[in-house]
Every structure is written in structure tokens, then in C-alpha cells.
Amino acid sequence: MDNTFDWASGFTSKELRKLRSMKNPCGIQKFLDDAPYHLADTAWSPRRVLNEETAHCCEGAIFAAAALRANGYPPLLLDLEADRDTDHVLAVFRENGAWGAIAKSNYTGCRWREPVYRTLRELAMSYFNAYFNLRRERTLRRFSLPVNLKRFDRQNWMTTDKPVWFIVYHLFDIKHYPLLSKAQEQRLHRVDERLFQAECLGKALKGSGQ
């Protein structure tokens, strides 16, 4: 826990109890899995996500980072960068020296990762096969190092009523590292119908009420 900044002061006692009741990364992932995916162009704070109980990818990761902090972990985000596709954001954590991830996604395989990955690159590559666009191209290309969100404490990123676009813009600006060589990129195959349908299971669509 941080002693230099009272990050918890913006939450009510009820909100803190709810965050801490999640207990661990798996409990946080369950909250995100139970929350409907929404498609609005928003940047809600973790407090707003907690109360609305809905989120998209980036909001889900930022929420998960806050919930990790409430349960004794550093609030870390990692950004996955794609070509001809949208980026994906993960809240990452370490247990027994290995990396795992919590994520909210509209696609089946781009969510939770058990803490079994020795390096961040290895963790990022675990998303490669299921990361594709609607043209069925495998699109994941780069990953960032973790960003500790305590850097935004003075902007009250956990509890503000204002959008937290400043976190999103920071992820755009940080250095990303390539996952594939150019030769590998040129030899990639499109995903087949079975994988495409499996990844789209339960997908929220515009006008679906989610």
C-alpha cells in the first residue's frame, strides 16, 4: 500500500469494501466478466465502473488496476498495440515471480491470463492467436512495459467524475516493443471460421442493449 498519498480517501467505505471483497486478481476478473461490455466512447474512472457495473476494454483494465491496488498489488497497466485494429489494455500483476493479467474484452480469448508467464513479452504473445480484426487478420504487433497508475494520483484517477482520457493518451505516447519480425508479419494466415466464431461468443453489438 502507498503511504505517501491517501488514494483510498475518494472512495466511500461501501465502495472500498466492495473492491476489497474481490480479494485477488481472479475475483477482480470475475467482476469484469459479470459486467456487461458497453460500446460507448467513454473513459470512466474505476469508481464510475464500480457503480455502473459495466465497462469496455480500457475502462475495465483501469478499474482492475484500482481493484488490484485495493487488494495490495501495484496498479499496473500494459498496452497491446495492433495494426489495422484497436489496441487492448491489460491490468498486470505478479505472483511468485510470474506475470498474469486481468482484462475486459468483447472477445472470448482476450481476457484473463493465469500468472504463469516468465516475461511480459511471453504474456503479450499469449494474446496473439486470438487477436484479430473483422477481416480475420491477426493484428497484434507490439507491447509496452507496465505503467504504474500511481503516477496519476494527483489527478484522482481512481475516483474522479471526469473522464480519465489522460491515462489513454499516456498509453499512446509510451514506447512499445515489437513482437514479430517483418518477415513473420508477411507470412501470417487469417483465422479460420471456427476460431472466429469461438472468439465472438457473447459479443456485444451496437443496439444490443449492452
Image (cartoon, rainbow, N blue to C red):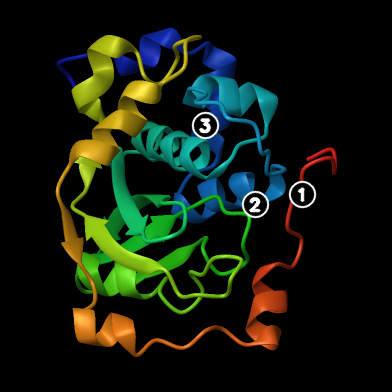
> Tag 2 or tag 3, which sits nearer the N-term?
3
- Image coordinates for residue 97, horizontal then vertical, percent: 19, 66
Per the image, the residue denoted by label 2 is 33
- Image coordinates for residue 42, horizontal then vertical, percent: 55, 26
Q: Which mark is residue 19?
A: 3
User: Residue at the location (25% across, 21% down)?
Assistant: 152
Pointer 1 local density, CA inside 10 Å: few below 14, some 14–19, many at least 20: few
Per the image, the residue denoted by label 1 is 205
Amino acid on which disc 1 is placed: Leu
User: Residue at the location (54% across, 52% down)?
Assistant: 29
CA distance for labels 3 and 2: 15 Å
Pointer 2 local density, CA inside 10 Å: few below 14, some 14–19, many at least 20: some
What SS does tag 2 mark? helix
Name the one closer to the observer, 185 or 127. 185
- Is there any visible trace of residue 181 in the rendered image? no
Q: Is residue 86 left or right of residue 6?
A: right
CA distance for labels 1 and 3: 28 Å
| Quarter residue 38 falls in | top right
Name the one closer to the observer, 48 or 97. 48
Cβ–Cβ below 8 Å for labels 1 and 3?
A: no
Q: Nearer the viewer, mark 1 or mark 3?
A: 1
